[in-house]
Image (cartoon, rainbow, N blue to C red):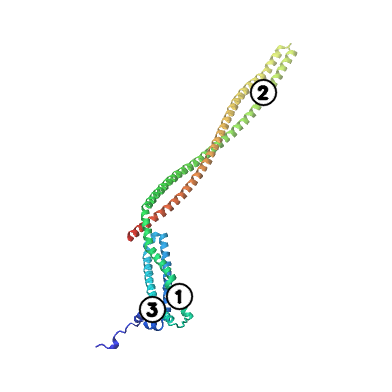
Amino acid sequence: MQDLNSLPAPDKTSKQWHKRLQAWFVITAEMANEKPWQALFITTRKLRGIVMVLIALAAIGTGITLFIFLFPWKLTNWLPVLQVFLGLFFIALLLFIYFREQGNRFHARFLEEVRQLVNEQQHTFIPLDKRRILRQFEWYSKTAILKCNLIALCLALIFSTAPKKVINALILRKQSLVKSMQTAIEQKRQRIAHLNALNAQSEQMVVQAERLIKHNQIYIKRLRKGMQKHYRQITELRRYLRHLNQVDYQIRQLQKIGHNEIWKQERVVKSNGLVMGHIKGLVQAKLEQKEKPVALADAMLSKHGAILEKFKQLRVRYRKLERRTNHFSYLNSLEVKKAQVQIIKNKQLVKELKNNIKQRDNVVKSFQYSLAQAEQKFPRLKTLEAASQHLQ
């Protein structure tokens, strides 16, 4: 046989817990018979605590119900919590009914005692604390608590039926909502593709415009080099013309000198012919001697005249060439101005295209953001459909 000390000791904590629970639920017959006022007071206090618990559960359940109304896709997460609160609410309601029946028995016994005393024509005096207990019990059991019970029942019905009705209504709207969202998403995707195509075209135009700007700048550099070459040619031609003018001046001086010499010799010949006419031989010899410088002067004049004619022809040619080079430089300057104007226009076009690209990028970003939000709503609709199937 085993030793009695070796046997496991009974669980004292479980026995105490059972005793406390039994004492909280059941009021002993001794207290009900000997101390009915104390039993009524304990019952009233329990009713007050249960009423506070009912109010708290009703408030929390109402908050969860409103949350489900605002965010119906959270139903699958919050529906078990709501069911737990609903079960606690019904348990508290049953406890309230149980303790109210006990209190009604104590209250009926007290009223019978009062009636017996009144029938026996005895003086009855109820103390103030006992009257307060009676008023509290009557308030909790008969008047306001009935309204609270009705409100609690309505809230319980709301807890049990409202989410399901919300889901049913959302199920009816789900198909049209999904179709509208799909069409909106397709339209946004098409719009994004169209804007991306426009941005690609604008970027190509920007590249072409920048290429034209570089080409025009190179063309301007080449024209300016040609203008500098023309300017150098013009300076050389002007130097040649200045040299020609100097030679022309020298030739004219020689012409003046030659004419003066001829005139002098002619006067000498005339004077000699008049004065010394009687000696022809001597005059003839002298004339022969005097005619040599005249022939030389004529030869010099004819030679310088030919040179002068050549210089005149060169002057005309150089002046024509100067006019041509000036005309070419003028045309080059006009081309430079046109190229500069085209560069300015291309730069303005590049700025406008870049601004358009930025605006389209912003529109594309907004469309992509709204598209991401719309795509995020599809899983919510799927969870909503699963929750509705679970409820059905």
For this rendering, which residue is in front, 151 or 265? 151
The quadrant in which residue 155 appears is: bottom left
Chain-order first, disc 2 or disc 1: 1
Chain-order first, disc 2 or disc 3: 3
In the rendered structure, find residue 24 and report the number of the disc placed on it.
3
C-alpha separation, residue under disc 1 versus residue under disc 3: 20 Å
Q: Is residue 125 above or below residue 320?
A: below
User: What residue did someone put label 1 on?
Assistant: 136
Please give the name of the residue rendered at 39% of the width and 74% of the height, measured from the top-left corner.
100
Please give the name of the residue rendered at 38% of the width and 64% of the height, measured from the top-left corner.
157
Q: Residue furthest left?
A: 1
User: What residue did someone put label 2 on?
Assistant: 255
For this rendering, which residue is in front, 43 or 276? 43
- Proximity of marks 2 and 1: CB atoms separated by less than 8 Å: no
Q: Provide residue 383's location: percent of width, then percent of height.
A: 36, 58
Q: Is residue 269 above or below residue 157?
A: above
For this rendering, which residue is in front, 86 or 38? 38
* Amino acid tagged 1: Gln
